[in-house]
Amino acid sequence: MATVSYRSASCVYPGADTLAVDALDLDIADGEFVVLVGPSGSGKSTALRMLAGLEEIDAGSIAIDGADMVGVPAKDRDIAMVFQNYALYPNKTVAENMGFALKMRKVPLEERKRRVAAAAQLLDLTDYLDRKPAKLSGGQRQRVAMGRAIVREPRIFCMDEPLSNLDAKLRVQTRGQIAALQRRLGTTTVYVTHDQIEAMTMGDRVAVLRDGRLQQFSAPTELYDRPANAFVAGFIGSPSMNLFEARIVPDGVAVAGSILDLPRVTLDLLAAEHLEKVTVGIRPEQLDIVGETPGFAAAVELVEELGNESYVYARPKDTENGADTTFVARSPRRAPARPGETVTLRILDGNSIHLFHPATGARLDLISPR
C-alpha cells in the first residue's frame, strides 16, 4: 500500500496546443479507492498513465510514499495495471496468465503457485485455472486480468476503464466485486472511468476532470449534494441536474412564471455579486408533479417508465425563464402523465436548489441541500 501525491502535474502530447493534464493536484491516502471521472478528452487516462510511468510528466511531480517518481521507469514503481482489453495471452491457461509476471521476475515456482491459488480463490476462479481465455466469459476474463495484478502484490492498482467491454448486467456485478475486493485487500487504487454511476458507487473519493483540469475532488455524496460548479452539477447524477438561467427578483428568482423564494443570506450574496441573472440547478427528485397547487405549467414531451419510478421530461409554458430547458422530474408513481399533456411542476424545497455564476459556473449559494 502507498500514498500518492500529484503536485501541479502536467502533461502535453507532442504537437498538441493544450495540456492533456493541466497542473493536477491530488492527495490519495494509503489504501484509498479513488476514481478519476470525466468526459472523453478530460485527461483522466493520461493522469493515470503518468502515475504508472507510461506517460512523461512535463511539469510538476508525482510522488509515491513521498518519493518523487519523475524519471523513475514504470517497472520500478511497483504498480499493477488493469486495462479494458484484458490483454491476456490466448495460448496460456488462466493460471499461466496470472503467474506470468511473477515468472518473468524469477519468483520461485512454489511461491507463484501459492499466490495464483490465493488470487483465484478471491476471484472465484479456482475451477478455471486450467482453461484458456477463449473458454471464458467476458467477466471471467476481466477477473483473470485482475488476478494477474493481484498476484504481484503491488503498492498501487491502476485500472483504466476495466469494465468498458462488459454488458450492462455484468458491469454492475463486476464493479461490485472490484469494490469489495479492493476493500478486502486494502491496496491503494486509482480507477479511471467515464461512467459517473461507476464513480459514485465505487470510489471513496472521486476526482472530476474536464479539459485536463481538476473540477472537484470529494466524496461521492459531497459531489452530489454540493457540486463545486455547474459542470460537476450537470455531470454527476442520472438523470442530470436541471440547469437553467433565471432572473433575480427581490425575494428570490423567477422560474418559469413563478417566484422561488430564497433565504436572505443567499439574496445578500447574489446582490454582492451584482448579478441580474443566475444559473439555477434543481435535481429531478426535487421537482414534484402536482395538480393545481402553486408551481409552473409544463408540456410533457417524454415519460420514461422504470417500473419502480418514472421520469417525466416537460418544457415550461412560460417563455421568460427556462424557455430552452426541458425539465426532468422524478415521480414514484407509474404513468404520472402522458406525452402531450400539461402538468404542474413544483419545487419541493427551496433549500435544495443550487446557484451558480452564469459566466464562470462557480457555485454561489450558501444553501445546504437537505
Image (cartoon, helix red, strand yellow):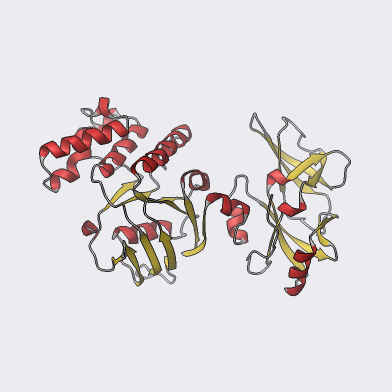
- Is 125 rendered above or below residue 40? above
The picture places residue 104, in percent across and down from the top left corner, at 14, 47
Residue occupying image coordinates x 49% and y 53%: 206
Residue occupying image coordinates x 75% and y 64%: 266
Name the foreground residue: 341 vs 1: 1
Whether residue 92 is visible, yes or no, is no
The picture places residue 126, in percent across and down from the top left corner, at 26, 28
Judge left or right: residue 307 versus residue 63.
right
Q: Could you say which quadrant of the image residue 89 lies in?
A: top left
The picture places residue 352, in percent across and down from the top left corner, at 71, 52
User: Across the whole image, how many numbered discs are drawn on residues?
Assistant: 0
Whether residue 2 is visible, yes or no, is yes
Taking the view exactly as shown, the residue that stands out farthest to the right is: 292
- Is 300 rendered above or below residue 137? below
Residue occupying image coordinates x 28% and y 42%: 150
The picture places residue 355, in percent across and down from the top left corner, at 70, 61
Judge left or right: residue 346 versus residue 140.
right
Name the foreground residue: 252 vs 170: 252
Q: Could you say which quadrant of the image residue 14 lies in?
A: bottom left
Judge left or right: residue 364 versus residue 153.
right
Name the foreground residue: 162 vs 222: 222
Judge left or right: residue 348 versus residue 173.
right
